[in-house]
Amino acid sequence: MLPNKPNSPSAAPPALVPNNSLITATAEEGRQLAVHMTRLIVKATQPDGEKRKALRDVYANDAMMLIAVSQVVATEFATIAAANGYWRSA
Amino acid sequence: MLPNKPNSPSAAPPALVPNNSLITATAEEGRQLAVHMTRLIVKATQPDGEKRKALRDVYANDAMMLIAVSQVVATEFATIAAANGYWRSA
Amino acid sequence: MLPNKPNSPSAAPPALVPNNSLITATAEEGRQLAVHMTRLIVKATQPDGEKRKALRDVYANDAMMLIAVSQVVATEFATIAAANGYWRSA
Amino acid sequence: MLPNKPNSPSAAPPALVPNNSLITATAEEGRQLAVHMTRLIVKATQPDGEKRKALRDVYANDAMMLIAVSQVVATEFATIAAANGYWRSA
Amino acid sequence: MLPNKPNSPSAAPPALVPNNSLITATAEEGRQLAVHMTRLIVKATQPDGEKRKALRDVYANDAMMLIAVSQVVATEFATIAAANGYWRSA
Amino acid sequence: MLPNKPNSPSAAPPALVPNNSLITATAEEGRQLAVHMTRLIVKATQPDGEKRKALRDVYANDAMMLIAVSQVVATEFATIAAANGYWRSA
């Protein structure tokens, strides 16, 4: 389910947080980051690209799963928005 | 599931956050924004309009899915409300 | 799923947030607002009153759906309670 | 699903928030309040006591529903704990 | 589902919050408390130990239920971590 | 479901929070910690490694379960990110 050594620094590029930062210039980019981070967690849990593609076809065509994906994105976005002071002065 | 270059600025109009801002004049508008952002995430995950319409007919007529959509909206609204200082002085 | 012009001011009465405000005099009224806002989102997603009544009969008699509705209300209430400073001095 | 006049003061005793307050003396009492408020929302959604008892028998004997009830209580408790400053000096 | 007199002080030992406090010395202990509080809510909802044991065997062997239990613990932990200032100086 | 003495200090190494701390150097490491903590809760609930492996194979190949795992990670990450001040100055 996970890379082998969580909590340890690594020379590899960040696999779970693009740019290794929650800070974005705008709300739109923050929202995109939320979607991206959701996708990367799915990738970490199911690293096989072929299987992942099959599963994506499943949930993109299943109403309840579409809603459930939206719930995850909403949760990630809440964190990212707080990190950015809600882009109040953007 | 996602636009190809999350985290990158783009000349295209915002696809996930209307007006590229979480700030609204009133609570009512904030609530509308929460619903809108929920819809846009579904759209990003299932870009095919015909399929999306079919799925919407499904969840609008399924009690559990209606509740689940409400849960997503509630989560988005929590973020938007915090961004706006809860419209306390509105 | 939504009114056509989210994010735009309108002369129509608020459809999603009663009184266009999250501020209430007491915790009890805040709780009632949470339930009301949950109901209004369901209404926006399924505007047909007859269908909505049928769905309500479903979830009021299904244990898991009753619990799921309670989860939505709990989430809305968290936002409303924060907006009101938790009615600490009420 | 709801009392008829949400958002309006009433002479009736609070139906959704016991004592009309989120403030409790201790964490234990706050936890009890979270459970109580969860039960009261279920009651507002399904006012028929007989039906509610039947549903309670269902979820008390269904592992997934027990977990889902716990999730609602956890969410309510988060709000109550914040309201009470987490009883840090209690 | 609940002890009979929520919100009332009692001479009985705390049944829902061990030590009647959210404060712990370390993050590890806070995490243990989150698991413990989750278990105690399940116990309050289904007080019959034999039935509870049967249900526990069910969810410990069901992938979706294991995940759902983890979700509850994560929610409780969020509250406990905030109460402890995230053990930043621990 | 749990170690026998939650809330008590112990000489054993932390079983639920790696390094007994929520503080990490970067967002990437914080995200890894969120995944790790999710895995450790599953381990505490189902200590049998063989059964756990079988269950993991189930959820890694089930779209809804993959989404549900992502929801747990998102919730844990929200807590960890807050603990770290969102790595704003990292």
Image (cartoon, coloured by chain):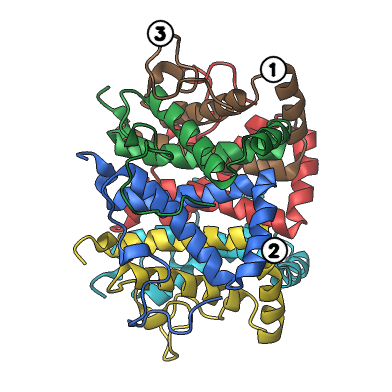
Chain colours: A brown, B red, C cyan, D yellow, E blue, F green
- Residue A11's tag is 3
Task: Estimate the x, y position of residue B1 in percent, counting from the top left.
Answer: 65, 26
Q: In the picture provided, is C16 more to the left or to the right than E51? A: left
Disc 2 residue crowd, few under 14, some 14–19, many 20+, Cα 10 Å: many
Q: Picture quarter containing residue E50?
A: bottom right
Task: Estimate the x, y position of residue C34 in percent, counting from the top left.
Answer: 49, 66
Q: Mark 2, chain letter? A: D
Q: Would you say residue C6 is visible in this rendering?
A: no
Quadrant placement of the C terminus of chain C? bottom left
Local SS, label 3: loop
Q: Would you say residue B48 is visible in this rendering?
A: yes
Give whichever of E67, B75 is nearer the camera: E67
Tell me the residue that label 2 is attached to.
D62
Q: In the picture provided, is F2 more to the left or to the right than C21? A: right
Q: Amino acid at mark 3?
A: Ala
Label 2 to label 1: alpha-carbon separation: 36 Å
Q: In the picture provided, is F10 more to the left or to the right than B4? A: left
Give whichever of B68, E67 is nearer the camera: E67
**D23 in relation to F82, above or below:** below
Identify the mark nearer the N-term, 3 or 1: 3
Q: Mark 3, chain letter? A: A
Give whichever of E45, C61 is nearer the camera: E45
Label 3 to label 1: alpha-carbon separation: 23 Å
Q: How many marks?
A: 3
- Residue F45's tag is none
Tell me the residue that label 1 is attached to.
A49
Give whichever of B87, C33 is nearer the camera: C33
Task: Estimate the x, y position of residue C43 in percent, counting from the top left.
Answer: 65, 62
Q: Picture quarter containing residue A70?
A: top right
Q: In the picture provided, is D81 more to the left or to the right than D64? A: left
